[in-house]
């Protein structure tokens, strides 16, 4: 699964990596949590140009009666998104890239759960495969998203059986293309990252969403 992630990369690096026209400067984030806004990239309906968007993490289907359902839909299993009512419409029409430069996973050690940060060795940003939706409630229109997961690769399997789908840059265009067919998209959902990924210990303070600073990536030496 994917329940927390990071985005510390400067706006200029993200603009260059994803071919955006512009992006306002970002505050470094060390512990992005469900229901918070996350940076996504999607194709403009009219121009097809890639544009950044801030989406609430936790997908709220258009037919939902209550926005609280989003807290239960932070992840979508790649094996079932084409059939599940919560995701199948978005899979056909509303796909996005969710920008990150690392994510957390936990490993049990006795009674404790020790966090690890998974990132590229060069610490450059990358993209999770995502879906997004529009939901209209009493306060107006709300746009939300979910991160797609797949079976963990050999690197991550000791920590968890699932991991987010990390798309390879050459596949970004296919994933965002409005005309892409399911048979083109499904192979991308087996993507489990690149050989440059590494797993490094993190600080248990990431267990609380209240902590969102550099110390999240500084593990107490005595724990490891």
Image: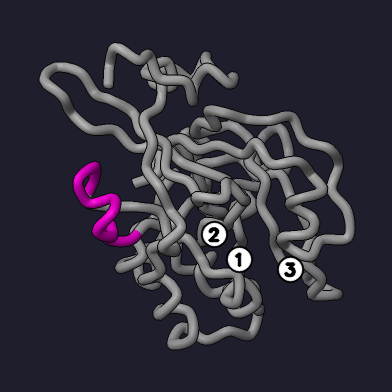
Q: Earlier in the sequence, mark 1 or mark 2?
A: 1
**Mark 1 and 2 residues: CB-CB less than 8 Å, in contact?**
yes
Q: Residue at x 42, y 43 (%)?
A: 118
Q: Earlier in the sequence, mark 2 or mark 3?
A: 3
Q: Residue at x 84, y 48 (%)?
A: 23
Residue 177 image point, x, y percent: 65, 78
Which quadrant of the view contains residue 10?
top right
Q: Secondary structure at mark 2?
A: strand
Which quadrant of the view contains residue 222?
top left
For label 2, the crowd category at 10 Å Cα-Cα, with few meaning under 14, some 14 to 19 and many 20 or more, is many
Q: Please state if 129 lies on the left or on the right of 143 as rendered.
A: left
**Foreground residue, 119 or 1?**
119
| Residues at marks 1 and 2, CA–CA distance in whole angstroms | 6 Å
**Mark 2 sits on what residue?**
131
**Mark 3 sits on what residue?**
43
Asked if residue 113 is positioned above or below residue 200 in the image, the reply reads above
Q: Residue at x 62, y 50 (%)?
A: 124
Is 153 one of the magenta-colored residues?
Answer: yes
Q: Residue at x 45, y 68 (%)?
A: 88
């Amino acid at each position: 699964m994917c329940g927390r992630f990071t985005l510390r990369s400067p706006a200029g690096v993200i603009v260059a990596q994803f071919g955006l026209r512009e992006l306002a400067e970002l505050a470094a984030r060390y512990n992005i949590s469900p229901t918070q806004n996350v940076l996504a990239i999607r194709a403009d309906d009219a121009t097809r140009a890639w544009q950044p968007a801030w989406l609430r993490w936790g997908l709220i289907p258009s037919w939902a009666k209550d926005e609280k359902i989003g807290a239960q839909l932070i992840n979508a299993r790649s094996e079932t998104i084409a059939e599940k009512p919560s995701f199948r419409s978005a899979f056909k029409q509303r796909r996005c890239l969710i920008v990150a430069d690392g994510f957390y996973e936990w490993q049990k050690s006795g009674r404790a759960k020790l966090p690890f940060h998974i990132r590229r060795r060069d610490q450059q940003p990358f993209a999770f495969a995502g879906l997004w939706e529009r939901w209209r409630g009493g306060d107006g229109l709300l746009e939300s998203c979910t991160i797609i997961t797949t079976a963990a690769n050999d690197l991550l399997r000791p920590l968890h059986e699932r991991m987010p789908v990390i798309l390879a840059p050459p596949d970004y265009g296919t994933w965002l293309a409005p005309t892409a067919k399911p048979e083109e998209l499904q192979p991308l959902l087996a993507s489990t990252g690149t050989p440059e990924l590494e797993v490094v210990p993190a600080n248990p303070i990431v267990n609380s969403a209240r902590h969102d600073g550099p110390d999240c990536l500084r593990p107490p030496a005595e724990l490891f």
